[in-house]
Image (spheres, helix red, strand yellow):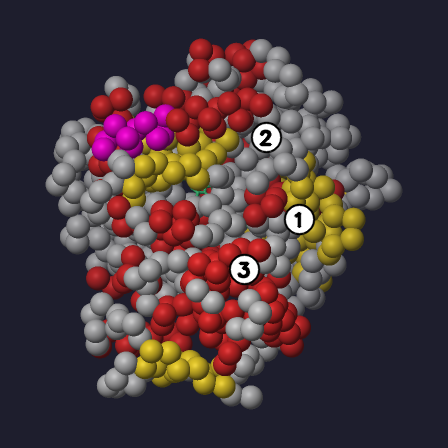
Amino acid sequence: MATIDLNDDSAVVVIGSGAGGGTLANELCQKGIKTVLLEAGSMESTESFVNDEWAAFGQLSWLDMRTTSGDWRVAKDFPNLPAWICKTVGGSTTHWAGASLRIQEHEFKALTTYGEIEGATLMDWPIGLSDLEPYYAKAEDKMGVTRTNGIPGLPGNNNFMAMYAGATKLGYENCHTGNMAINSRPRNGRTSCQQLGFCFQGCKMGAKWSTLYTEIPDADATGNLDLRAGAQVLQLQHGDDGKVNGVLYADKDGNQSLQKARVVCVAGNSIETPRLLLNSASSMYSDGMANSSGQVGKNYMRHMTGSVYAAFDKPVRMWRGTTMAGIITDESKHDTSRGFAGGYEMETLSLGLPFMAAFLDPGAWGRDFTRKMDEYQNMAGMWLVGEDMPQESNAITLHESEKDAFGMPVPNVEFSDHPNDIAMREHAFTQGSEVYMAAGAKEAYRVPPYPSTHNLGTCRMSEKAADGVCNKWGQTHDIANLFISDGSQFTTGAAENPTLTIVSLAIRQADQIAKLMTEKSI
Amino acid sequence: MQQTVVFSRRKFLKTGTGVLVGSLAFSLGSVSTPAVGDTWKLSLESLDSDTGKALLKVARHIFPHDTLDDAVYALVVKDLDGAAADAAVAGMLSDGVAQLNDDAGGNWLEASDEDQLKLLTARADGPMFGKVKGTAVVSLYNNEMAWEHFGYEGASFDKGGYINRGFQDLEWLPQPSESASPPKA
Ligand SMILES: Cc1cc2nc3c(=O)[nH]c(=O)nc-3n(C[C@H](O)[C@H](O)[C@H](O)COP(=O)(O)OP(=O)(O)OC[C@H]3O[C@@H](n4cnc5c(N)ncnc54)[C@H](O)[C@@H]3O)c2cc1C
Ligand code: SF4
């Protein structure tokens, strides 16, 4: 591990060690660039992960207070837990299921493809699929995505068999065990999946890609990385020239330090990234940093989601094996005859008994609830994930009075569904239920969205500075040496799970940062 | 204050001995299971025994699983008792129970199951109900006895995962094609 002096102003500082930040830090280190990686959470390992849902939740999740508003049901059921994401070295890549899909060509051109939709702030991305293709290829290789690079698909578990049986009966043509960043064969020094079934709790085999045990140790091996865990950045600072020149952070005991920087890259996930920019207001940047457009924190997206669990008359035991074990992609197209713009994916999902109780129908009680719980071992389940509409009013803001342990205002997450989201969810619930009924289920249950696992769009990329926060490289329009390096960059959400795109953008951004540093323009 | 509630087991847990008794003692600490006999005890630190008994029944009404043993519901009471170390919580819980007793014109526990539920439902917006529900939705389903009851097998790391232990053993559904679901390595 390198030790970079607090006053060394030649290094790049990356904030957050998840999919975006962990990857970016490694890519920079591989190019010989000295990098300080600041991570608010602590360091765990495959040994310390616990295969127990609530215990792992306590170990890995971001549990600092957040508040919610808007008409989404999460605000009522989980008022202080709008998002289910992590605070630990590796970020939410410790938790994630591993589904790794490319965004489709037409989804990069959302406005052109869907046209103006009332109430939605749709835009085209300033990049298209062809810009990202080489980086998608690099990311898939790095992450070991199944069904790419000659890597075989994973074997399907019982939960997949239930989905597959229904999908084929309904005439869906694209149902398989997915493109997963989970080793189906040993690869890159990591073993293959043993079907433990606790992908959301930290993979104890290390078979699932996580920056914790891939990018970060690789970066460390270069001698260019200074990783500081338990370091929560509170504020970005700038000089008279308006450029960022350092970041103020607190260690876990609350001691504050100022780390100087040549370049700063923010990858705290789409709630913390805008929170940090907004909390960095100064006399020069009175609305927060990189916010001349007023778009910081706006257009918060979380994907249209929902789940269908169905009870069969015999045990399925969906918990055995990979949490996300298969996919139906037929509905991910854009086809307005269904009554909405954009598309969605159907992906198997299993919850253990403890989480099933918490999420099946939050707040419910009595016989109708327990009757469903009694079917637990007979259940199969899928998650529905689709493109939601960006809306300016869905936003991250700083709470007026609530503060965290370090005195930083807590973020409020405002979200309400757009009518397009509601129409899509209705369609997805219907189709998901049909899949299981076709496979012979007795009953299908519609399960409302969980706290957000995909958080996107709060510092979006735009061609013009007036429309968004950063350009096609994630470089902020306002401040040349400040970059957005996580899913906050997404101009629109697309139907696909976002992480492969976050990683691809990070690899691409590292190339650009290196180029600009060599040119001495940053 | 240490109060002890003695419950009689309507039926001992499925496997009868060993494992579940062990896990009960293990996960509860203060619940002691007699080696022989059909009663077990729940020691309460903060709540009195009548409140504890009533809360167990409240939890049963909120999440009724007829064949789930009282011992599992006792875990909810145990966690409520823990929370009741805070005097405000203790007061709120015992007030809630006192309210039910008032509503029942004496002892709510002596009312019929049907009447108990009716009276409890009328108080479903109250803080005691909310606290028991919020605690039970975690405690009731987050223990090995419940896992055994519902057939959930939980962690598999120590056993080498499910890869050789039935992760694809459904014989009553068609086998997916090899391209959809390739064979395991
Ligand atoms: C249960 C679950 C399942 C998922 N499954 C999938 C899937 O199958 N496919 C998929 O594509 N995606 C999935 N995701 C989403 C995926 O995890 C995220 O898209 C991805 O990890 C986001 O990357 P990120 O870099 O933006 O943020 P994260 O990975 O969340 O990392 C952000 C890091 O920044 C740190 N941080 C935040 N603020 C600060 C600060 N001020 N100072 C220092 N550090 C800070 C946080 O502690 C955190 O470690 C899943 C997520 C969850 C929770
Ligand atoms: S199922 Fe596979 S990927 Fe998931 S935790 Fe287990 S070994 Fe890891």
Q: Position of residue A26 (x, y in %)?
A: 48, 45
Q: What's under tag 3, amino acid-wise? A: Leu
Q: Which mark is residue A272?
A: none
Q: In front: mark 2 or mark 3?
A: 3
Q: Position of residue A272 (x, y in %)?
A: 63, 46
Say yes or no: labels 2 and 3 on the same chain. no
Q: How far is mark 3 from mark 1, CA to CA?
A: 34 Å
Q: Nearer the viewer, residue B49 or A457?
A: B49
Which is the main secondary structure of the residues drawn in magenta? helix
Q: Using residue A436 as the reference point, say whether residue A282 is left or right of it.
A: right
Residue depicted at 25% across the width and 40% down the height: A312
Residue that mark 2 sits on = A417
Residues marked 3 and 1 touching at CB (< 8 Å): no
Q: Quadrant of residue B140?
A: bottom left
Q: What's under tag 2, amino acid-wise? A: Asp
Residue that mark 1 sits on = A67
Looking at marks 2 and 1 on the same chain, the residue that comes earlier in the sequence is marked by 1
Q: Position of residue A31 (x, y in %)?
A: 49, 41
User: For the magenta stretch, what is the residue range?
Assistant: A431-440
Which residue is most to the left?
B171
